[in-house]
Amino acid sequence: MVTSGTAQPWVPLAGQSHRLALEVLLHGPLSRAELARRTDLSAGSLTRLTKPLVEAGLLVEAGPGAGDLRPGRPSQPLDIVPDAHHFVGVKITGDAVHGVVTTLRADVVASARRPLDARTPPEVADVVADLVHELAGQVPNVTAVGVSLGGHVLPDGTVQRAPFLGWTDVPLKQLLEERTVRPVVVANDVLALTEATHWFGEGRAHSQFALVTVGAGVGVGVVAHDRLLAGPNAGLGLLGHHALDPLGPPCPLGHRGCATAMLTTGSIERQVAAARGDLLSYGEVLDLADAGDELARRVVDDAGRALGRLVAVVSNVALPEVVVLGGEGARLAHVARAALDAGLAGDLDPLAEPPALAVQAAGFDAWARGAAVIAIQTYVLGR
Amino acid sequence: MVTSGTAQPWVPLAGQSHRLALEVLLHGPLSRAELARRTDLSAGSLTRLTKPLVEAGLLVEAGPGAGDLRPGRPSQPLDIVPDAHHFVGVKITGDAVHGVVTTLRADVVASARRPLDARTPPEVADVVADLVHELAGQVPNVTAVGVSLGGHVLPDGTVQRAPFLGWTDVPLKQLLEERTVRPVVVANDVLALTEATHWFGEGRAHSQFALVTVGAGVGVGVVAHDRLLAGPNAGLGLLGHHALDPLGPPCPLGHRGCATAMLTTGSIERQVAAARGDLLSYGEVLDLADAGDELARRVVDDAGRALGRLVAVVSNVALPEVVVLGGEGARLAHVARAALDAGLAGDLDPLAEPPALAVQAAGFDAWARGAAVIAIQTYVLGR
DNA sequence: GGAGTAAGTTTTACTACGAAAGATATTCGA
DNA sequence: TCGAATATCTTTCGTAGTAAAACTTACTCC
C-alpha cells in the first residue's frame, strides 16, 4: 500500500527518471519503447530507469494496449496510478469559494462551493479551510492544496494584491497551512488555469499557445517553448482595458469599448439591464441571444466581435498555435462564434496562418481545477 | 595558424564543449572559474573541457584581466578569436542592397551599398553577389553569408513571399550560393535583427524581451525563455495594421490610424508633404520637429504616441523585461520620447511594472548586421 | 510449427562528471 | 622578506549514466 503519510514529492527522482515519470503523467500510458523514442534514450536505459520506478510503485505496467494487433512482441505500457494521490483546488472569487478534488491526472472527482459573506483574510481563510476539510474527507491521500485568485501572488504564497477582495500583502499560504495542516500553494488564477490547460487541457499537444479568459474580468496567459510566460506582470489582466471597439460602452474607469466594458459578464448584464429595465443573469442574456432576441443578440455579438479582436492581438504578438478561450464567461465564444470569427479575421493579416481556436469547459470548477493543477505541479516538480 | 579553408562549424563540439564556447562567444572573455559558475560544472570539468578547445585554437587565453587586484591566484580569462572568422550580412530592401562585414562577435568592420534598379530574382541576386564579392575581398576568412529581407522565408532558404519585391517562391539561397560559391543563409529581416539583439545587442542580458522596429514597415520580434518566438507567422509584420489612433491618417489599405499609417517613414513623409506642399525626407521631418516646427512636431508626436501604444500592446501580451526599439526609423523614439512615454503609460496597467525601453542604433547597417548574425548563428549552431 | 517482427532485458565497455586533494600564483599583513 | 590567506587551476579517482550489441520473449502471419 502506498504510504498515506507525508507527501514524498517526485523531486528525489534523478533527472531522467523524473523526466520519464512526467512524460507518463502527461501523455498517458506509454510503452518503454515509446518512451525511448520520445526521450532519445536507448532501450537499455529504459529498462534500467523504469525498473526502480515500477518497484517503488510510482509506475505500474498497465494492461496490454487492447486494440493494436501488430507483429512483434506486444508492448507493455507503463502508467502512473492516478488516484494514488488526490489534490484539492480552490478558487476564491469576490463572493464565493469554489473547490474541487482531483486525481494526479487532474480529473475532478468531487466539487463543492461556499458563499463568501466576509472578505477579511482570516474569515476567508476559515471558509477555505472548511471547504478543504469537507472535500479532503471524501478521498484518501490528499497530497496538497492549491488555491487561486485574481491578483498578484508572490513566490512565497503571499497575496500582494487582490482587488476583488481588497487585499494587500496577505500571507494566505501561511493562514491556510495553519488551518488545514496540509501543504498549500497559492497562485494567480489565470496562470493556474493556463498551466492546467498546458498540462491537462487543450494546450497539451502544443508548445506554444495562449489562453484568453472572460468572466468577471479578462485575462491572458501565454505558453511559449513549453513554458509559461512569467514575470512580475503575468496574469494581472494587463489587457483588461485594451481598446476593442471605439463605439462600445464605457467601463467603470471610463475607457470606451475596452475589454472590460465589452467582455466581462458584469458589463454585459449591465448593458442589457440598462436597455430593458430588468436585470438578467449572464447566462440568461446568452440564452436570449441564442433564441433570437434582438437586443441581447446585439450586445452579445458586439462582445463576440470584441473577443475576436482581442484574440487577434494576442495571436499577432504571441504567435500561438492555438488560442484557448476559457473562464466562466467562455460560453460567449459559442453563442457569438460568427461575430468572434469576423472580429478575428478583420484583425489578422490576410496572408497569415490563423490560429486554431478551442473553447474550454466554462464554469468555476475549471478555475478550481486550475488551482489543483498548481498543487500537482508543485508536488511533481517539487518547487 | 588557423586554417583558412572550408569552414568547420562548431557543431562537432559535444554538448558541454559547445555550451562553453557559446558562453564565451556571447559573454566575452571568461575565466574557467567564472564559466564553472555559469554552467554549474565543477572546476575539474572545466580544465578537462577547455583543454581541447584551447589546443584546437578555438579558445585562447586572453591576457590577465588588468584591473582586478584580488587575493588568490589570478584568473586566466578565455576568449574566442573574433577575427578568426568573418561574416557578410546583406539586407535587401525595395530599392537598395546594404551589406556589412562582421567578426565572429558581430562587430562591423566594413560596409557597402548598391542601388537596386531591377527587382527580378536573378538581377537582385547578381547585385547581392557583386556586393558580397566586394565586401568579402576586404577581409580574410569569410565563413558564411547572411541575407535578410522583409517577407516569409522557408527553412530551406526559399523566399516564399516578399511584398516589397513582388516575389513569390524565389529560391534565393540557391541563386546566391551559385553566384558567390559560399554558404548562404536567408532569413526574415525582423527575426534576424531580433536574433542580433538577443546575442549581441540590448537583449543580451535578458531572457525575455521584445524588439519593435519602425521604418519602411513595422515589425515585432519576441524572445521568450531565451529563444525567439517562431512559427509560420513570425516576422511578418502582423501588427502592421493594428489600430493605434482612431483619428489618425489612413494607410494605403484604408485602415485609419493603423501602425503603418502612423509609424512608417513613408507615411510620415507623406503626411508632412500633404500639409506643406513640398517633400521632405524622414530625417528632415525629425530635424524640423526637433527644431520646433509646429506641423512636424504634431506629426512626429502623433507617431510617438502611437509607438508608445504599440509598445504597450506588445508589452502587455509578451511581458518583456525590455522593449528595444529598432529599425531605420528608430530615431523617432528619441525625437518624440515624451509622446512615446505618454502613449505607453496610458495603455499600461497603472499597477504593472513598466518595461525598460532601449533604442537601438538605427540605419540600414543594423539590418545588415542582423543578417550577418544569422550567418554567425548558423555557423556556430550548425543548422 | 516455423519465419518474421518488434519489445524488452542483459551484458559490456565507455564516457562524463563531481569530489577531493594538490599545485600555482597572487595579495596581505607581520 | 617571509609566511598566511585566498582563489584559480590541475590532477586523480570513483561513480553514475549511457549506447551498443547480443540476447530473450511474445506475439502475428503464413
Image (cartoon, coloured by chain):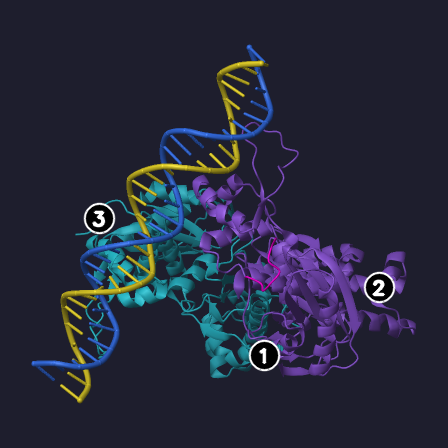
Chain colours: A cyan, B purple, C blue, D yellow
- Proximity of marks 2 and 3: CB atoms separated by less than 8 Å: no
Choose top left, top right, bottom left or bottom right for residue B118. Answer: bottom right
Residue B105 marker? none
Mark 3, residue position: A4
| Label 2 secondary element | helix
Q: Which residues are magenta?
A: B1-8
- Left or right: A291, with A59 as reference point: right
For mark 3, name the chain: A
For mark 1, name the chain: A
The kind of residue tagged 3 is: Ser
Front one among B176 and B22: B176
Mark 2, residue position: B283
Residue A111 % position (x, y): 32, 60
Question: How many angstroms separate mark 1 from mark 3 (CA)?
Answer: 53 Å
Asked whether the viewer can see residue B215, the reply is no
Classed neighbour count for the residue bearing mark 1: other residues with Cα under 10 Å, few (<14), some (14–19), many (≥20): some
Question: How many angstroms separate mark 1 from mark 2 (CA)?
Answer: 36 Å
Classed neighbour count for the residue bearing mark 2: other residues with Cα under 10 Å, few (<14), some (14–19), many (≥20): some
Choose top left, top right, bottom left or bottom right for residue B201. Answer: bottom right
Question: How many angstroms separate mark 2 from mark 3 (CA)?
Answer: 72 Å
Mark 1, residue position: A345
Sequence-first tag of 1 and 3: 3
Residue B159 % position (x, y): 62, 78
